[in-house]
Image: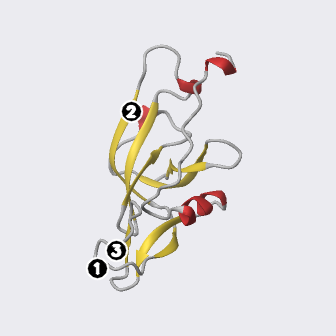
Amino acid sequence: MSDQDVKPRPVPKANKYVATDSFWQGTKDGALLLQYCPDTEQFQHYPRPVSIYTGKRNLEWRKVAGTGTIYAATIVRVPGPGMDGRLPLAVVTVELDEGVRIMGNIMNVEPDAVAIGQRVALAWDAINDDIAYPAFNLVEA
C-alpha cells in the first residue's frame, strides 16, 4: 500500500465549549492530564466546563498514572487493506485507577489477546510528530 492509499488519521480540533488545551499540551509532554474537582477530590473524564459533582467551575487539570483495568473491549476489523496497515485494532474502555473511564487503543499485541479485566498501562499512539492520543499496553499479571 502506498502513502497515497493511506487515509490521514483525524487530528483533534479545538472545543468551543470546554477548554481542553491542558489535556492536549499534556499529551505533547507525555502526560495524561484529567480534570479534577478539588471540592470532592474526584477526577472526571471527558472534559466538561463544570464539575459533574458540584456544578462549580473550579476544576483543575492533574496528571494521572494512566494505569487501570479493561472495562470493555472491541476489535475493529475492516475487509480489505487496513487504514495504514494497523487493522485489526483492539479498542478498549479502561477504568483508570483514579476512577474514571477513558477509551484508547491497545498497542503492541494481537487484538485477540485482549480481554476484559486485564491490567493496562499508559502508552501513546502518535498521529504525527506533534500529536499523540492516549493508548495502552497490556501489563503482565
The picture places residue 84, in percent across and down from the top left corner, at 59, 26
Task: Tell me where residue 123 appears, x and y as whole percent.
Answer: 57, 52
Label 3 sits on what residue type?
Ser
Q: Secondary structure at mark 3?
A: loop
Q: Is residue 90 above or below residue 70?
A: above
Residues at circles 1 and 3 in contact by the CB criterion of under 8 Å: yes
> Is residue 24 left or right of 15 when viewed as pictured?
right
Q: Which residue is mark 3?
A: 51
**Mark-to-mark CA distance, 1 and 2:** 37 Å
Question: Which residue is under mark 1?
Answer: 54
Report the disc number at residue 7.
none
Local crowd at mark 1 within 10 Å, few (<14), some, or many (≥20)? few
Q: Residue at x 49, y 62 (%)?
A: 66
Please report the residue visible at 35 percent of the width from the left and 67 percent of the height from the top: 99
Return the residue at label 2: 75
Measure the alpha-carbon separation of dots 1 and 3: 5 Å
Q: Place residue 129 in its image quadrant.
A: top right
**Residue 75 vertical position relative to residue 137 in the rendered view, above or below:** above
